[in-house]
Every structure is written in C-alpha cells, then in structure tokens.
Amino acid sequence: MTQLLGNEPGEPGDGVPRRASLDALLRFAWDADAFTAGDALAAVGLSRSTTIEAIDDLVALGLVRELPNARAVGEYRKGRPSRRFELRADAAVVVGVDAGQEHMVTTVADLRGRPIAARTQVTAVGGDSAARRRVTVVEAIDASLAASSVRRADVLTVCVGVPAPVDRDGRSPVHRDGFWADMNPGFTELLSSWAPIVRVENDAVLASVAEHARGAAVGLRNTVTLLAGHRLGAGVVIDGTLLRGAHGGVGEVVVLRHVRGVDYAHGIGHDLEMWASEVLASGTLPKEHPLRTLPPDAVTARAVIDLARAGDPPARALVERAGATLARIAGVFGSLYDPQRIIVSGGLAPGVEEMLTVARRLLPAELDLPAPELIASSLGADVVSIGAVAAALESARDGALHIS
C-alpha cells in the first residue's frame, strides 16, 4: 500500500473549487464500479477539463487507479478508447471496533467496506478499569491489523463504539458512578496519536448507522433504532440527520425510569432474565418445567424466547409482558421524535417477533401521533460492529482529502 496523501498536486487558481471538485469526484468514485471520465462528468456536473484534471489528481494521490482501457478489455471496438478508472479499495484500511462492556469485536476492512479480518474477545465485566480498557482496545486493533497483514501506517480511519453517550468530539460526559469514563477513557486522544481520522460513537448510534447503511432504515429519513439487549439505548435520525445533543445524550433512556409501566432503563434481554428468575424464585412453576431444570447461568433471554416459541405458557406470558413494555418504550420515542420506523436491533432481534406482535397491537394507544412501524433488525448481534465499519468509511470519505 502506498501513502495516501503526500504533497498535493499544484492548485489550479483558486484552491476552493479544486478541493470541491476533488471531493465530488472522490464521492462518485467511492460508490461507482469501473468508470470513465464521461461517467463521472454526467454524475458530478463539472466541466470535462475539470473532471479529467480531478481524476488525474486522485490518481496522483493514490485514491484512484487507472484501469486498462475499454478496448483492452474487449468492450470497445471503434474510435479512441475511453480511459477507465476505479477507487483504490486497497489504498488503505479502516478499523471498526465494537467496544462493549463484555466483549470487543474488531474488524479491519478495505475502502469498499469488505472485511479483511475480524476478531472477537470477551472482556472483563464490572471491574474493567479505564487504563486496562485503553490497553485492551489498542491490543485488539493491533492484533486485527497483524491478522490482516497491514500496518498502522495503512489505517485511514478508526471508529470505536462504546456503551456511553458521546459528543461530536468523541468525548463522554461525567457519570455519577464513573461508568461512562470507564467505557470511553479518552479513545479519541489515544488513537489520534497514530490514526489520521478517529471517530468515537455511542453503540446505539452505530446500530442506527448500520441500519441506514445496509439494514431496515435504508432510504428512510426518520427512524429510531433501539439497541435492546441487556442494555437499552437508541440511535435517532430525524429529517436525515443523526441527532446527538450537546453531550451526546440523545437516545439515553434514563427517562424511562419515570415512565409508568417501565420504571427502569434495562434492555429486553435483562428484563426477560430478571422476570424468569422472579418466577423461579416464586415456586409457582411445576418441578418438571424446563426453566427449573436449567442451571442459573442458562436461564437466559434466549432460553425464555425459545420456550415461548415452543408454546410454553409461563414463557409466553413473560414474552407478552416484554411486548407490552416494548410498546410503552416505543410510545415514548414515537411521541418524542415522530419517526417513520422504530427498529429493534441487537443480538435478540431475530427472536423478538412474538414481542413485536404484542407491541404492535398495543402501540397505537401509547401515543396520539400515527404509530410508527415497529420491526426487527436483520443484522443480528453484529449490528454495532457493522455500524462501526460503516461509520469509519463515512468518515474516511469525508476526511481523506483533508488530512494534513
């Protein structure tokens, strides 16, 4: 791989139009397959000379490569063959990190977003210090780069998703128990020491990015994505804009503690496990009931959902209770943001259809506005990791020409 941006080609007159034309051509190339100057000209609306000059500049910068011409590949027979180009997907890599409280998923991808290597590890629960977390993230990134046979110098963008609110500068506010600082212990400053572009985001925000990039929110401008596993958080896009707020707090769910019928801000998975434990402790289940035969650590949300699907009445009652809670939560977000669609994402998403059936029935009574569509994500447990790569690519596209 070559250095992306060395000395820039000479500025032809005013530098602002030149930079604008390079940005326009790079965005076109990023989405296009092989293209000609004519293809680019039609897409970006620049003059022919400016288009060709911008393409040549991107070739010189190492972001675009020239391909064999149309005649050489058998697609052109008469006249002067057209020059053909494509984005250099191997010019650099991006790194997406899902830095959860209990896991670390690190993905290295090329500039088309195609994964080169991915690595998952379990991290400490509860006692993970900020200092140790910084070390863990760096080690995970370096291990994934080594598995990809690339160097730190080949990285254009790193995006890290954390279970904490994050502002536009990648920083998290102070939490009363220090949790947010532990989850995001200065990742922007830490990684900016070697990565040209660093982006730190809340994990639910990255779930929303993933849904808009390749999931249930593609083409939509008003959505709420609920990351609903053991924790609950939301990524909010309104009028096509990802909302953050002054401290990154849009989508934080502490308000649900004050909502009758919810009273806390846990995720669906946590709720199901808590309620199942309460039922077991009550002694009301028959001795032969499947939940009573499981060891305590196997009484999971997935186990409850599977039993409900199999027709077990006590498990079905818990799932219906979860659906009613989900309707109340969706009603809060529906009233606040008026989205077209609310997407339930995360590892439990493939199994929540029974809950959604209940929630869809109850949701219209929870708000005065038209009820948003309520659906499950198809991206599964990898949604934050997918979003981290998509966000890294988005930042790479925006910043590749602005690296000093």
Image (cartoon, grey):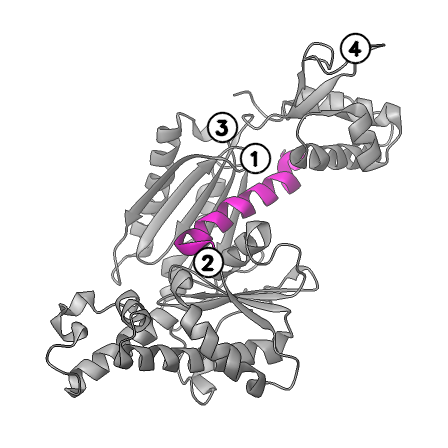
Vertical relation: 225 (above or below) 98: below
Query: Total marks drawn?
Result: 4
Quarter of the image where one finds residue 41:
top right
Residue that appears at 66% across and 60% down:
220
Q: Which residues are magenta?
A: 378-403
Label whose residue precedes the other's in the sequence (1 or 3): 1
Q: Is residue 388 magenta?
A: yes
Disc 1 vs disc 4: which is toward the camera?
4
- Residue, disc 2: 203
Disc 1 vs disc 3: which is toward the camera?
1
Mark 4, secondary structure of its residue: loop
Mark 3, secondary structure of its residue: helix
Disc 1 vs disc 2: which is toward the camera?
1
Disc 3 vs disc 4: which is toward the camera?
4
- Residue, disc 1: 112
Query: x and y percent of residue 168 in the render?
Result: 58, 57
Residue 255 appearing in the image: no
